Amino acid sequence: MPADLVLLPGLNNTAAVFDEVTAALPDGIRGHGVDLPALETVEELADHVLREAPERFWLGGFSFGGYVAMAMLERAPERVQGIALICSGPAADTPAQVAKRHEAIAGARQGNYVETAAASTAPFHPDSLARPELLGRRRAIVQAYGAPRYVAHCSACIARPDRTALLDGSRPTLLVTTTHDKVVAPAILERLAAAVPGSRLETLAGAGHLLPMEQPAALAKVLARWIADGGAS
């Protein structure tokens, strides 16, 4: 019976961020990229995804999607076969991050969201900046995502609690980082892997923070191997 893998996108991303990842998954895994609507708490978003998700599933959260994934794990642990945090973590925002999010919300409300988000180079590996087709797809996703969703999701980031304690080794846990992530530092995932019993850490080259678009085949391979191994470290 095929395994179901639910994939949750990050800030500035629709489910389209996973299009090439799900296309690269083997036949034994059904990938479900999920759009996250403009809801202002990760708990509301978790409930939204759980209403439509398969009864039992493997769960992957990219960046902001990882925060929603942690809320899903808290609400329905019996349904989650394993959890993968992709360039993400379970902790709450720091005061400095909260301040930056308030600034970003104010900017988005002033009407500069699409230009600011699409122009940012922070999510990318340096080599990706020479890939016009990737930058074009990124801009299209930002436009489809839109300012109202960005404001709602920034608010959800600010309000979320620390859920680190949920990663207690009681279920398969995969932590995926990259060599050039400037948004969620690789060291954060490395420390988390050392603290979570039985977890698996994968570090992928050739990508920055936007791993699902920069190296989709490599990410699909890591996820498929993890599921095929039953989540064993």
Image (cartoon, grey):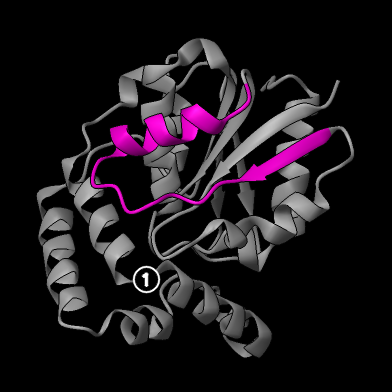
Type of amino acid at the residue the image marks with label 1: Gly
| Count of numbered circles in the view | 1
Q: Position of residue 169 (x, y in %)?
A: 50, 14
* Residue 193 showing in the rendered view: no
Q: The N terminus appears in which quarter of the rendering?
A: top right
Visible in this render: residue 151? yes
Question: Is residue 39 in the magenta section?
Answer: yes
Question: For the point 44% across and 45% down, which residue is it?
Answer: 65
* Relative to 22, residue 198 above or below: above
Q: Residue at x 39, y 49 (%)?
A: 64
Q: Nearer the viewer, residue 79 or 167?
A: 79
**200 to 103, vertically: above or below:** above
Residue 80 lies in quadrant: top right
Asked which secondary structure carries label 1, the reply is loop
Residue with the mark numbered 1: 146
Q: Position of residue 180 (x, y in %)?
A: 51, 65
Q: Residue at left 60%, top 65%?
A: 207
Q: 96 or 139: which is nearer to us? A: 139
Residue 96 image offset from top left, x and y in percent: 12, 56
Provide the residue span drawn in magenta. Answer: 29-54
Task: State yes or no: residue 232 in magenta.
Answer: no
| Left or right of 220 in this view: 74 | left
- Toward the front, the furthest residue is 51
Q: Is residue 86 left or right of residue 223?
A: left
Within the image, what quadrant is residue 76 found in?
A: top left
Category of crowding for the residue at label 1, using alpha-carbon neighbours closer than 10 angstroms: few (below 14), some (14–19), many (at least 20): some
Residue at point 53% right, 64% down? 210
The quarter of the displayed image where residue 229 is located: top right
Decide which of 131, 190 is in the foreground and name it.
131
| Residue lying furthest right | 27
